[in-house]
Image (tube, rainbow, N blue to C red):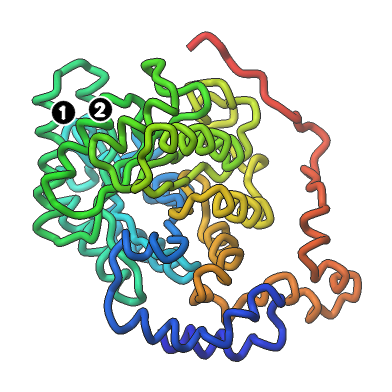
């Protein structure tokens, strides 16, 4: 953290005025953070918490995860690649290192069939153990919390019953308890019933519970509204509830408004809100329960839909103003998107992201040798910009296949 303090003071004369206000008290804020590792709920009560971003999609792009299966064998096969991505998110400003345990239940790993070393079985226990170690190692390099992450299991949609599904969850809980994660995070759930079962399993650990579903305004795959999903998650025992994946930030925020209003109407005031959307524009999908995987561009031609850093900053500000306090990203959210969020919310957090030694925001463009770049060294230029695709053949919106 010492290097972060030096960075903030050195950049004081050049950084946007909205962030300069935090410089005066930054050193004391950093010192307080070092005194004791604050827990998730304490942090949320005092300001925004920045989550991390894309793992399975980003590591597939880098050649460490297989598309289609989307399972996390890289934890055992390429641990340095996983650790490096954790470290990039930490440097970008993430407060949370989520274990790369997406789809790591035994029934999902068996379906993927992606074991490079056929002499070693990759299962939930050995994968989750190493995933926790990697996340904890990087978290300890800064002031980050470790979140044990769980996701849906195939057994639910295969109708194998609650006992089977709970046994898959419990295997992961056993590892998270032994490894002493700071909190647990359920994500990517599409059915509120399975979500409630996941919360039931997580309650065994007696640590904070965050829970998010991959739903939009149309609700879950069983036809349950976002409002009811939010209330049921809270009543099941989640301390933090919200949305992740499937939809872009602005569809996500529309859904979060619905969830927030429902929680208030139900008299539930103790829950914090979280939002971790995808890093692409998905305008066509607002009322489509399938989410972004229904797009014809998924997964190998999504780049034209990427959020800009200005999009990420705008999302962070609108989320915070709505009352969302756990703010991050999911598939497609790269470290630079998270850095944009961390920079946008630096006044509220009282801290700059560690990577600030190589980022002075928009003002950095005034250092260019090309004078035409100087006029772009302002926030207003980028907020007013309408990006071009740079190609002749491009669609504004995709035609969705309704046959699925």
Q: Is residue 216 visible?
A: yes
Q: Which mark is residue 263?
A: none
Disc 1 from disc 2: Cα separation: 8 Å
Q: Looking at this view, is 248 or 79 the one in front?
A: 248
Report the residue marked by disc 1: 165
Which x, y percent locates residue 392? 83, 35
Q: Residue at x 50, y 76 (%)?
A: 351
Is residue 300 in view from this perspective? no
Residue at image mark 2: 194
Name the element at disc 1: helix
Task: From this view, report whether residue 185 is shown above or below residue 152.
Answer: below
Occupied quadrant, residue 234: top left
Check disc 2 and report its element: helix, strand or loop. Answer: helix
**Rendered residue at 52%/46% (across/down):** 332
| Vertical order, 150 against 75 (above or below) | above
Which class describes the residues within 10 Å of circle 1: few (<14), some (14-19), or many (20+)?
A: many
The foreground one among 67 and 346 is: 346
How would you rate the neighbour count of disc 2 (Cα within 10 Å): few for under 14, some for 14-19, many for 20 or more? some
> Which comes sooner in the sequence, label 1 or label 2?
1
């Amino acid at each position: 953290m010492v290097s972060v303090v030096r960075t903030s003071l050195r950049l004081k004369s050049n950084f946007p005025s909205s962030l300069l206000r935090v410089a005066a008290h930054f050193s004391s804020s950093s010192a307080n953070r070092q005194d004791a590792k604050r827990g998730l709920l304490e942090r949320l009560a005092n300001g925004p918490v920045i989550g991390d971003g894309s793992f399975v999609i980003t590591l597939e792009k880098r050649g460490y995860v297989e598309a289609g299966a989307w399972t996390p064998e890289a934890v055992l096969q390429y641990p340095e690649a996983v650790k490096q991505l954790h470290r990039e998110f930490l440097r970008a400003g993430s407060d949370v290192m989520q274990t790369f345990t997406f789809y790591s239940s035994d029934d999902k790993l068996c379906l993927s069939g992606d074991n490079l070393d056929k002499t070693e079985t990759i299962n939930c226990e050995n994968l989750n153990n190493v995933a926790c170690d990697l996340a904890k190692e990087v978290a300890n390099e800064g002031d980050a919390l470790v979140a044990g992450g769980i996701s849906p299991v195939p057994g639910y949609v295969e109708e194998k019953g609650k006992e089977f599904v709970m046994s898959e969850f419990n295997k992961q809980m056993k590892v998270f308890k032994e490894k002493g994660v700071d909190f647990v995070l359920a994500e990517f759930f599409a059915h509120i019933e399975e979500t409630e079962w996941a919360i039931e399993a997580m309650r065994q650990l007696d640590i904070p519970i965050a829970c998010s579903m991959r739903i939009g305004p149309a609700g879950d795959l069983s036809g349950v509204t976002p409002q009811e999903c939010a209330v049921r998650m809270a009543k099941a025992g989640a301390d933090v509830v919200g949305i992740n994946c499937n939809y872009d930030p602005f569809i996500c925020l529309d859904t979060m408004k619905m969830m927030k209003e429902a929680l208030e109407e139900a008299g539930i005031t103790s829950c914090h809100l979280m939002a971790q959307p995808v890093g692409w524009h998905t305008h066509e999908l607002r009322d489509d329960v399938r989410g972004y995987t229904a797009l014809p561009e998924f997964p190998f031609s999504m780049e034209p839909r990427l959020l800009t850093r200005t999009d990420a900053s705008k999302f962070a500000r609108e989320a915070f103003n709505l009352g969302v306090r756990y703010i991050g990203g999911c598939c497609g959210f790269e470290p630079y998107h998270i850095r944009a969020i961390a920079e946008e919310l630096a006044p509220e957090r009282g801290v700059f992201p560690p990577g600030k030694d190589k980022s002075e925001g928009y003002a950095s463009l005034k250092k260019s040798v090309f004078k035409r770049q100087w006029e772009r060294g302002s926030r207003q230029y980028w907020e007013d910009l309408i990006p071009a695709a740079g190609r002749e053949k491009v669609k504004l919106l995709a035609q969705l296949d309704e046959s699925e």
